[in-house]
Image (cartoon, rainbow, N blue to C red):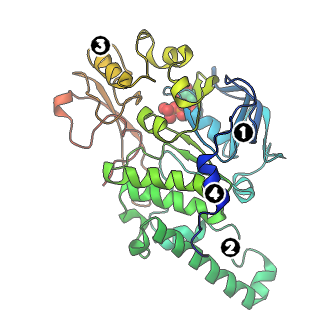
Amino acid sequence: MSEPQLTADAVDYMTDARPIAEGSAGPGCAKRDPIVVADNVSRRFGGINAVDVEHLEIPRHKITALIGPNGAGKTTLFNLLTGFDTPNSGTWQFEGTNLEGMSSYKVARLGMVRTFQLTKVMGKLTVLENMRLGASEQPGEKLRNALFRGIWGKREKDITSQAEVLLAKFKLDTKRDDYAASLSGGQRKLLEMARALMVSPKLVMLDEPMAGVNPALTQSLLDHIKNLKAEGMTVLFVEHDMQMVRHIADWVVVMAEGRVVAEGPPAEVMKDQAVIDAYLGAHHDVDLGAAGGVQELEEVLAADVESVVGTEDAGILSEQSVLSEDSEVLTVEPPDDDGEGGGRERRSGRRATDSPPDAVPGVSRDAKED
Ligand SMILES: Nc1ncnc2c1ncn2[C@@H]1O[C@H](COP(=O)(O)OP(=O)(O)OP(=O)(O)O)[C@@H](O)[C@H]1O
């Protein structure tokens, strides 16, 4: 596979200033060119309505951020749309194809792939083997391929060379023969993103791509996400860091208590009262969209010992946030050495002054950078 080049069309994706919504922005608003359309998708866990989305459209060729406080239903919605969970009700289409009841691997083959909050790379496989697993059609998967060695061998080579191109792009080529378990948290995120691209997807869904990523890799991850759009892909990502959302998102969808409570361009959404209510509770006076708004919010919340928004648990704030004294810190144990286990949450009362350098707000929802 050759390195994708920026075409005239691709440049258009980066500069296309046509309106994203058909009419005015707002919860469930129609898009000019939706790639995903969902209707009445709901999922209950016991008495909790984890997801209760009346109507949602994801705009094609754009970067959409899905934000909302902890427990808003973002990950559950990802799971439902990609076939990793089954809703209690609802229908949804990807490029006009109904996905109801479709298994996750078939959804991926259609071109809708996702990554996980806690990465799911296979620690006991090498980096290259992980990449090869991401390929849509494995040699030998079909009997005819197994019978015709020529076809099989050619496909093997194609998959390997496609993997090598992507590994080079994500600067993981020197790690190609290392076990994935030896990678840092950030490198695993990169590997998971690279592996998702093995099926040449049209829609890439990233669940907290920045969580647990060392600041040294943050810029690289941001660039990769922007490149996905430049290459014609649509991106939907869950993120808690508002700075990042403002930096790369074209459109923001806000969830609270399972519902979509606001939608629009980042600067507008962050001034929306429903968003401020969902995130801030009593702190209505701070404008997240204004320059310095987040900074102001950090200061307000740091001074408020009852607020959980300023702790890394709620995660709305960027890394520079200051923990209030005695803030409760949520950490997640790193995955087991096979990369599959771990992820157990552990709460501890920790004073801001005790925090180790890696226990910064906004990076707590995943394994820390090794
Ligand atoms: N498997 C499950 N069993 C029971 N309850 C669940 C399950 N998965 C999610 N929930 C509940 O559903 C609600 C939505 O959870 P979800 O993880 O989707 O929220 P989220 O917005 O992704 O939160 P976060 O930002 O913390 O990841 C929460 O109340 C959560 O406790």
Residue 163 visible in image: yes
Helix, strand or loop status at disc 1: loop
Q: Which residue corresponds to mark 2? A: 138
Residue tagged 1: 86
The residue type indicated by label 1 comes to Thr
* Discs 2, 3 touching: Cβ within 8 Å: no
Disc 4 secondary structure class: helix
Q: Which mark is residue 217?
A: none
Q: Could you tell which of marks 1 and 4 lies nearer the N-terminus? A: 4
**Of the residues shown, which amino acid type is indicated by label 2?**
Gln
- Furthest toward the left, the residue is 353
Q: Which residue is mark 3?
A: 304
Q: Nearer the viewer, mark 2 or mark 3?
A: 3
Q: Residue at x 32, y 34 (%)?
A: 361
**Neighbourhood count class around disc 2 (C-alpha, 10 Å): few under 14, some 14–19, many 20 upward:** some
Residue at x 41%, y 70% (from the top left corner): 179
| CA distance for labels 1 and 2 | 27 Å
Question: First in sequence: mark 4 or mark 2?
Answer: 4
Q: Which residue is mark 4?
A: 10
Q: Earlier in the sequence, mark 2 or mark 3?
A: 2
Image coordinates of residue 194 in percent, x first then y, are 53, 62
Q: Earlier in the sequence, mark 3 or mark 1?
A: 1
